[in-house]
Image: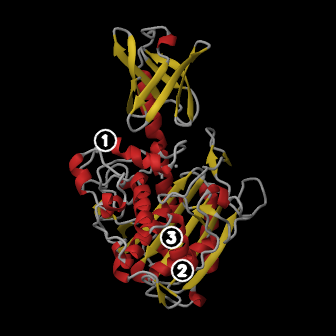
């Protein structure tokens, strides 16, 4: 998942010598690109990748590498369909820019003007929140991806629940990446224009750009004959196919599917400042607004390792804006089950590239992008593959160490305070809804949303999830006089009904 727990928050260009503009394709080293991509696929063990590179109005490289499914001779092509995950967000901000040109809305309209059912839990923030705030991740609401990820309820219900999510950051003061606000922004834009978000994106963006392969749901994507299969690593490190994430309804935060060929047109549109075939689709001023830094992304322990050579990193609207060794970069990533996507623009050099691959949460995109940018501008080479492989290893080691520390401090020999059947019941949170605990065959099971989590006793009234998405996480009960009155899971406290 952004994660779409992204919660955080990388492509390829190669030229002979520094690029100063939209050079003709005859000086483009396609063989060099092939070598570098092949090297990266092998180093990172990614099954397949689709690549589009654009300079000015010209597509200088459009190719697929590797396979759509590991162990099967089914090559990735420029027309292989991939889910874009959070790279959808730039389509939503661009649509908002188009509607601002139409006079249907304005960046600083209060959200309630277009979406009366939207609220924030902090009354002051709720009174002030604008469309611009939603699009720039500065509402003070953090992640909460599990309100949409694998949720059995629809987008309207997700937006309704935002009112009960705590505002933990400073309103207009802190960067907190969350797909929830893009879901609300897309719905607000649709209400302002009087047409569904997906219809607007298709009619106002995709069709004029000639992006004929786009899809907005999994059911629509499944009609494509040329479609990528996602992959993940097993606990033993092998690469295996991964079940895809089912997108049942269009989602302005992350449901768009597209091909590398489609996205070459998307890149040209942005490099041309909103023009396509001599026709202006959006004003340069409003399109530029979507790429203008709004919210500082502090280079903390999460963001910092991704941008080690950047002096500043900011979020605009559906784009991260940063410097890379003296060059302005505007980019955004997308992560969903089994798939990793990156769309990158170097606007001053009129260069853009997209990388679509089918391995879950790999950082190959970022490493490969940095490596090629360095090469194309004649910068001193740096082994970005080794750097980001170490970043991945450090992240895995940190998670493992945290679990080891927890297990080492575990109090052995303890027992639950009451018989297991007394933990059974329904537990509710205003935003996350109702979860259920059942006792079956001497074991507890916690069920919430679409997740079913078998539990085993850990210590006192804490239980460990033994398998599935939440494996190794704890479900902790608390109460009065031995009666469980609440449980804590996923960082959320559910009160017993």
Which residue is depicted at the point 56% across and 62% down?
A: 256
Percent x, y for residue 444?
54, 19
Are discs 1 and 2 less than 8 Å apart at CB?
no
- Toward the left, the furthest residue is 124
Of residues 341 and 254, the one nearer the viewer is: 254
Which residue is depicted at the point 61% across and 50% down?
A: 246
Q: CA distance from mark 1 to mark 2?
A: 43 Å
Tag in front: 1 or 2: 1
Residue 200 is tagged as 3
Of residues 300 and 463, the one nearer the viewer is: 463
Percent x, y for residue 465?
52, 27
Dot 2 alpha-carbon crowd within 10 angstroms: few under 14, some 14 to 19, many 20 or more = many
Q: Is residue 157 visible?
A: yes
Of mark 3 and mark 2, the one earlier in the sequence is 2
User: Does residue 428 sit above or below 350 in this rendering?
Assistant: above
Report the residue marked by disc 2: 54
Report the residue marked by disc 1: 166
Which residue is depicted at the point 39% across and 38% down?
A: 431
Tag in front: 1 or 3: 3
Q: Secondary structure at mark 2?
A: strand
Q: CA distance from mark 1 to mark 3?
A: 32 Å
């Amino acid at each position: 998942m952004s994660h779409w727990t992204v919660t955080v928050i990388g492509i390829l260009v190669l030229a002979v010598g520094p690029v100063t503009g939209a050079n003709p394709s005859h000086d483009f080293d396609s063989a060099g690109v092939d070598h570098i991509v092949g090297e990266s696929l092998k180093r990172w063990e990614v099954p397949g990748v689709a690549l589009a590179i654009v300079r000015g109005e010209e597509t200088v490289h459009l190719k697929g590498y590797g396979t759509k499914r590991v162990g099967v001779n089914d090559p990735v092509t420029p027309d292989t369909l991939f889910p874009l995950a959070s790279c959808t967000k730039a389509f939503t901000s661009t649509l908002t820019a188009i509607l601002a040109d139409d006079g249907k809305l304005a960046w600083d309209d209060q959200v309630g003007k277009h979406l009366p059912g939207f609220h924030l839990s902090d009354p002051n923030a709720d009174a002030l929140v604008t469309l611009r705030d939603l699009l720039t991740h500065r509402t003070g609401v953090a992640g909460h991806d599990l309100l949409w990820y694998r949720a059995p309820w629809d987008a309207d219900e997700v937006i309704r629940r935002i009112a009960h999510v705590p505002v933990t950051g400073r309103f207009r003061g802190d960067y907190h990446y969350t797909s929830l606000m893009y879901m609300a922004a897309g719905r607000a834009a649709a209400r302002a224009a009087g047409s569904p978000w997906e219809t607007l994106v298709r009619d106002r963006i995709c069709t004029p750009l000639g992006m004929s392969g786009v899809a907005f749901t999994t059911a629509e994507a499944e009609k494509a004959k040329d479609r990528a299969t996602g992959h993940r690593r097993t606990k033993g490190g092998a690469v295996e196919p991964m079940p895809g994430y089912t997108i049942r309804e269009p989602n302005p935060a992350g449901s768009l599917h597209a091909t590398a060929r489609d996205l070459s047109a998307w890149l040209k549109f942005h490099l041309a400042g909103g023009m396509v075939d001599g026709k202006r689709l959006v004003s340069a001023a409003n399109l530029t607004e979507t790429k203008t830094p709004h919210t500082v992304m502090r280079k903390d322990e999460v963001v910092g390792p991704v941008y080690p050579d950047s002096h500043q990193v900011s979020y605009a609207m559906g784009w991260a804006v940063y410097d890379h060794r003296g060059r302005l970069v505007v980019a955004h990533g997308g992560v969903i089950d089994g798939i990793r996507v990156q769309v990158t623009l170097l606007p001053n050099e009129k260069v853009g590239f997209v990388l679509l691959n089918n391995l879950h949460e790999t950082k190959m995109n970022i490493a490969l992008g940095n490596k090629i940018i360095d090469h194309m501008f004649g910068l001193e080479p740096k082994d970005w593959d080794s750097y980001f492989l170490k970043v991945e290893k450090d992240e895995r080691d940190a998670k493992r160490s945290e679990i080891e520390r927890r297990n080492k401090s575990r109090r052995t020999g303890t027992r639950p305070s009451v018989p297991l059947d007394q933990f059974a019941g329904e537990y509710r949170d205003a935003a996350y809804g109702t979860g259920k605990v059942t006792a079956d065959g001497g074991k507890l099971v916690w069920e919430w949303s679409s997740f079913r989590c078998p539990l085993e006793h850990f210590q006192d009234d804490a239980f460990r999830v033994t398998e599935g998405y939440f494996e190794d996480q704890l479900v902790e009960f608390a109460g009065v006089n031995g009666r469980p009155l609440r449980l804590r899971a996923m960082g959320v406290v559910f009160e017993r009904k």
